[in-house]
Amino acid sequence: MLKLLKCEFWKLKRKGLLKAATATAFIFPALDSALMSEGGFSDIISGVREESGFILLIPLLVVMAANLFFEEHDNDTLKNLACIPVSKNQLATAKIGVLLIFSVFYELCGFIFGMLLAVFKGVPLTDLASELLFTLGTGVFLTAAALPCVILVVWFNKSYIISVIIAFFYMLLNYALHLSDAVMMKPIGFNIATFLPVPVIFRWLYQYKTPEGRIQTEFFERLRPYFVPLPACCLIMAAEAVLCTALIIKVYRHQEN
């Protein structure tokens, strides 16, 4: 499996996609730091988790998934891999593993850059360990949040343009849902809101965020009863990740070589 992971990473590196994607991790921390006149270290890092993670990372993961899953079809190498032999189950698992590793690495890069910006601006690095754990955890959760969209990409198996369109609309939909009271202010249970990954991640993150201003404070007070504790968030995201991975493997296995 380690050799497969390495091979999958080399595919992305050969196309220059890894460097280009990683570079985007610095966009929002830089913007937030430049526009922020007041605020602490947590405000800078929240941009890494929220703006960079939810607006940029999820679409990037989907585009990467398209590159990884289309590679063998584009180059007609699936039959060669089957002779090694390497099963489609192993291939699909390795590709998803690459997405997970990159997601955590992406968030870590943003965190380190945000930390350097804070030092440059003279902002104290408060709760450094906690902020790092929240950021790495967000990277793991965002991989699970991207997998439903990856299912569509693998299912359609058409083109990179279709994949980009799917990723764009998936990002817009999820970001809009996390702004909806009807979705965010629902108790954990057997309801649709509980199984929407991005709003659930936000409901986990928001309980650690310090609200600013009257409007944001009022919103957080209304949302407080619906915060999702870490164990519940882990359970929900793990269940969805396992289900989505199984579906991706099933769809990928039944496609023609």
Image (cartoon, rainbow, N blue to C red):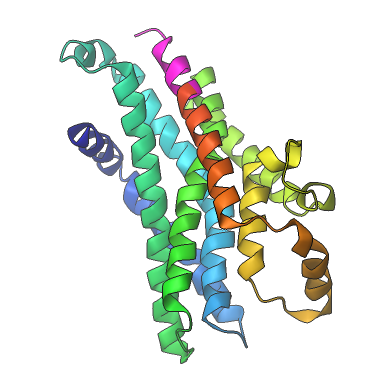
The x and y percentages for residue 82 are 23, 12
Q: Nearer the viewer, residue 232 or 39?
A: 232
The x and y percentages for residue 115 are 42, 77
Above or below 181: residue 37: below
- Say if residue 161 shows up in the picture: no
Residue 108 lies in the magenta stretch: no
Quadrant of image for the N terminus: top left
Quadrant of image for the C terminus: top left
Query: Would residue 161 appear left or right of 77 to someone viewing this image?
Result: right
- Magenta stretch in the rendered image: 247-257
Which residue shows up at 44% across the image and 80% down it? 117
Which residue shows up at 77% across the image and 49% down it? 187
Chief secondary structure of the magenta portion? helix
Specify the quadrant of the image occupied by residue 2: top left
Residue lying furthest bottom: 122
Which residue shows up at 43% across the image and 34% down it? 65
- Say if residue 30 shows up in the picture: yes
Above or below 251: residue 55: below
The x and y percentages for residue 180 are 80, 51
Residue lying furthest left: 84
Which residue shows up at 83% across the image and 79% down it? 214
